[in-house]
Amino acid sequence: MKAGVLLDNTNSFRDKKVMTMGIVTEMTGLSERRIRYYEARKLIFPDRTSTGIRKYSFSDIEKLMEIAEKVEEGVQTDEIRRDFKKRENDANMKKNMIRGQLNAHFQRTNLK
Amino acid sequence: MKAGVLLDNTNSFRDKKVMTMGIVTEMTGLSERRIRYYEARKLIFPDRTSTGIRKYSFSDIEKLMEIAEKVEEGVQTDEIRRDFKKRENDANMKKNMIRGQLNAHFQRTNLK
DNA sequence: CGTGTAAGGAATTCTGACACG
DNA sequence: CGTGTAAGGAATTCTGACACG
């Protein structure tokens, strides 16, 4: 319960997919073409309305700007994707570690 | 400076106007007609793109749901507007009070 | 490999008005 | 007063393809 709260990183607004392409191009300065291409390369995963319109979150925007930066440094999309995957893995491992320590803690203190 | 930080309530994402009408109708369950009407009655103030498309924030969404609730209770838009105005006034007064106390505090402790 | 562009269609949004009440 | 609706136009978004490299 407590652990759930502590580990709950849902930044509610940050992750809600609510922005359409026009806003995203405006906020990131990227072309529609580039944004769709990064999706094709499995770097971002917008939601879709029932009619096919893409919807992005604030964290998608941040991710896009990070991608664009790397690409401009000459990094290939494939490598960026691998980096993201690794990073996500690390985050999950950290989460599990914390969960383990919390469990240990409660077993010691609560003894049940 | 310090006071500025303490008083800075910019919830960054919550107040950014980034959603178009379709998303707003979906999130609030309200009709376009009602949403535009509440704007005409000075209850909400979406931004506009250069071509006239309305853009709403998460806090606009929350406000809309509150408005809808009141309207369904039979409250008239005019009264709702007055309530909002008053509430904003109260918030500003509170802000100024805090600012005053902080200033007093720093004058006492810093003596300059 | 990453991105621009023109093409054509589908979906979205906008305004002003008529309607009911 | 608050909201629905049909009307017509303007702006947005989508996909697939050709182009360059």
Image (cartoon, coloured by chain):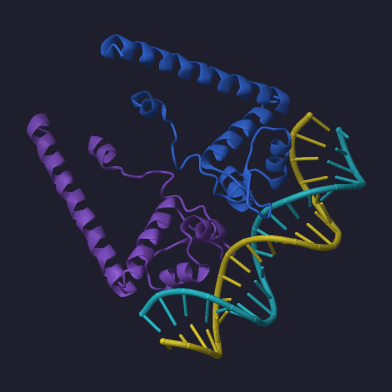
Chain colours: A purple, B blue, C cyan, D yellow
- The structure residue drawn at horizontal position 36% and vertical position 11%, both measured from the top left corner, is B104
**The residue positioned farthest toward the top in the image shown:** B108
Location of residue B75 with respect to B29 vertically, above or below: above
Q: Position of residue A27 (x, y in %)?
A: 49, 55
Q: Locate residue C10 relative to residue D9 in the image: left or right.
A: left
Question: If the image is split into quadrants, where does the N terminus of chain A sit?
Answer: top left
Label count reads 0
**Of the pair A45 and D3, the residue shown nearer to us:** A45
- The structure residue drawn at horizontal position 41% and vertical position 69%, both measured from the top left corner, is A38
**Of the pair B60 and A65, the residue shown nearer to us:** A65
Q: Position of residue B110 (x, y in %)?
A: 27, 14
**The residue positioned farthest toward the left in the image shown:** A108
Asked which quadrant contains residue A100, the reply is top left
- The structure residue drawn at horizontal position 30% and vertical position 9%, both measured from the top left corner, is B108
Question: If the image is split into quadrants, where does the C terminus of chain A sit?
Answer: top left
Q: Locate residue B97 relative to residue B74 in the image: left or right.
A: left
Location of residue A21 with respect to B94 vertically, above or below: below
Q: Position of residue B3 (x, y in %)?
A: 37, 23
Q: Position of residue B75 (x, y in %)?
A: 69, 24
**The residue positioned farthest toward the front in the image shown:** B112
- The structure residue drawn at horizontal position 55% and vertical position 36%, both measured from the top left corner, is B62
**Of the pair D11 and D21, the residue shown nearer to us:** D21
Location of residue B74 with respect to A29 vertically, above or below: above
